[in-house]
Image: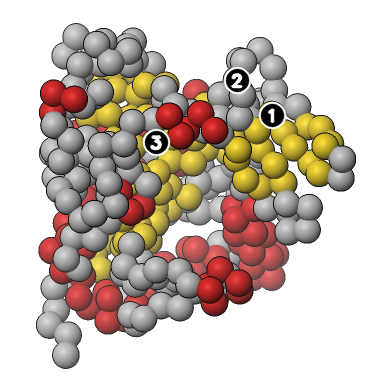
Amino acid sequence: MSELRQDITSGDWVIIATGRAKRPRFLDEQKKPRTASPIENCPFEDLQKSGNWPPIIAYPNEKNWQVVLLPNKYPALSGEESRCAESSLCGIYHREDGRGYHDIVVTRDHVKNFADVSPVMARNIFDVFQERHRIMAKDSCNAYISTFCNWGASVGASIGHPHYQLLTLPIIPPHIVRSLAGSKAYFKKNHRCVRCDVIREERKHKKRVIAENEYAIAFTPYASKSPFEVSIFPKKHFPAFGETPKKVVYGAAALLQLVLRRVRKHVNDPDLNFFIHGAPFERSKYPYHHWHIEIVPRISVFGGFEYSTEIDINVVDPDMAAAMLRGEKVV
């Protein structure tokens, strides 16, 4: 079993998961087509042959599936459903069992990533995300779920066939803890959601807004950590992704498709990650949280300064990045 280990000084957690080293790698670090792996060798083409059957969730059904949720064959976390992760000390160090769920969402098409699937397929993918969130929220052993996509070898993808991952944790990640603390402090001081105020500010000035629809808005954050970073927020306040009305989720998914196409067109098709930043499962404790999607293209490389200080250097002004993603000519 994997295990979580906590840094004794910073409080940060790492996952020790040696089994992940056995996963197949059909993509290398060179800039090649992301679907370079031959279709006949792809484990997602024949799920039964590759041992990835049966699925946990299948849309519209197992026989004619177009999108499925599968248990990851090389999980970062796994464990028995009958017990929660147990904490223990190893000398002065703190550890927890690597108990959790590591799932993958796979679409039928070998080539089309989220930017290129049909709007119906995009909604189906988010339906699977939401259904898994709701199922995992019922297990009191689970604290948080990370839902993300690695698109390209340089950002963590090992297989070119488009897929998405959900990793359910027994702890709340430190980054999320810090974000929640900041949101709570702002709420206590101003009696308003900080991200609702951010939406009002961005809509007022419009410099960093890329696009919006009835339910969601996409913009480059004022303090973007990396070039062409984009946030997509529901316009109304919802703490938990899994409990958000479908029309709102579909509005955010539509903007995600649009932004991904614009990043590909205007930023030379970089490798990128996108992920859902939701509330922990005990959502009643976090009414001040406002879930959203973050898109982070891999444009720059971390160096010694960034690693030693955790202060990012962004070489592209977010205002300029937004203008470029709107398709405007930037001098």
Q: Which residue is mark 2?
A: 79
The amino acid pointed to by label 3 is Gln
What whole-number distance in Å separates the C-alpha atoms at marks 2 and 3?
A: 17 Å
What whole-number distance in Å separates the C-alpha atoms at marks 1 and 2?
A: 8 Å
Disc 2 secondary structure class: loop
Q: Which label lies toward us, 1 or 3? A: 1
Q: Which residue is mark 1?
A: 97
Q: Where the C terminus falls, by quadrant?
A: bottom left
Q: Which residue is mark 3?
A: 165
Side of 112 where 47 appears, left or right: right
Q: Position of residue 288 (x, y in %)?
A: 60, 54
Residue 174 image label:
none
Disc 3 secondary structure class: strand
Disc 1 secondary structure class: strand
Name the residue: 66% across, 47% down: 13
Side of 27 where 276 appears, left or right: right
